[in-house]
């Protein structure tokens, strides 16, 4: 989907009253969420406990997904029940479907961690999630930057 569909170009008046067009600017909420995701990645990289590292990386990825949802807008759902960010990401940004599936699969582990069940989280699993969350966040940041430049 192009940025022109997501963010229609609005005419801007100059002193000579002629119309020109300005590239759309990504919503500040999307930019703020990407910043928060990046901070979360740094926190996850510094964390030594595997379970906490995993949960922090997951939260960073969730914030990156929220940034993409803020960029693309919310689909009309009428009176539908709440939906996972990963399901919404698949519908609004199909290019991120594989990422959504990957992180949705990690949701159960994060829920277990939040419930205090941490014995199944290995250092390797935490490291893998941190690495993938960082990569995903970078891709979302690039998509947001491209949308701001009018290239998405």
Image: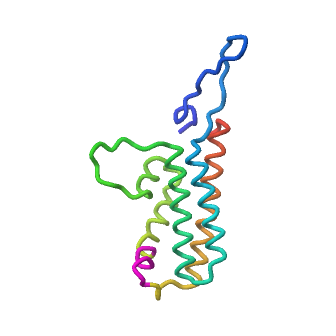
Please give the name of the residue rendered at 42% of the width and 84% of the height, measured from the top-left corner.
117
Q: Count up the numbered dots.
A: 0
Residue 93 spot, x, y in % from top left: 50, 48
Magenta span main SS: helix
Return the residue nearer the eye: 37 or 147: 37
Percent position (x, y) of residue 15? 72, 14
Question: Does 1 appear above or below 14?
Answer: below
The furthest residue to the front: 15
**Residue at 65% over, 43% down:** 146
Side of 95 relative to 24 (left or right): left
Residue 40: x %, y % from top left:
60, 66
Q: Is residue 138 above or below residue 28?
A: below
Looking at the image, residue 33 lies above or below residue 2:
below
Q: How is the image coloured?
A: rainbow
Determine if the magenta segment contains residue 113.
yes
Judge left or right: residue 147 versus residue 107.
Answer: right
Identify the image quadrant of residue 135.
bottom right
Measuring 52% from the left and 54% from the top, which residue is drawn there? 96
In the foreground, 135 or 73: 73
The residue segment tinted magenta is 110-117
Q: Quadrant for residue 85, please give it.
A: bottom left
**Residue found farthest to the right:** 16
Image location (x, y in percent) of residue 10: 58, 25
Q: Is residue 83 left or right of residue 21?
A: left
Image vertical order of residue 11 relative to residue 122, above or below:
above
The part of the image, by quadrant, that contains residue 126 is: bottom right
Of the 4 image quadrants, the one containing the C terminus is top right
Is 21 within the magenta? no
> Which residue extends farthest left?
79
């Amino acid at each position: 989907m192009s940025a022109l569909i997501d963010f229609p170009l609005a005419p801007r008046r100059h002193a000579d009253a002629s119309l020109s067009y300005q590239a759309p600017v990504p919503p500040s909420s999307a930019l703020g969420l990407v910043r928060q995701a990046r901070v979360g990645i740094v926190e996850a990289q510094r964390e030594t406990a595997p379970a906490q590292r995993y949960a922090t990386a997951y939260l960073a990825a969730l914030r990156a997904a929220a940034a993409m949802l803020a960029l693309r807008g919310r689909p009309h759902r009428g009176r539908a029940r709440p939906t996972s960010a990963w399901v919404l990401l698949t519908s609004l940004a199909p290019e991120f479907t594989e990422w959504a599936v990957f992180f949705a699969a990690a949701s159960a582990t994060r829920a277990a961690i939040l419930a205090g069940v941490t014995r199944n989280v290995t250092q390797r699993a935490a490291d893998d999630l941190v690495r993938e969350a960082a990569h995903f966040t970078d891709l979302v940041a690039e998509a947001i930057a491209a949308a701001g430049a009018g290239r998405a």
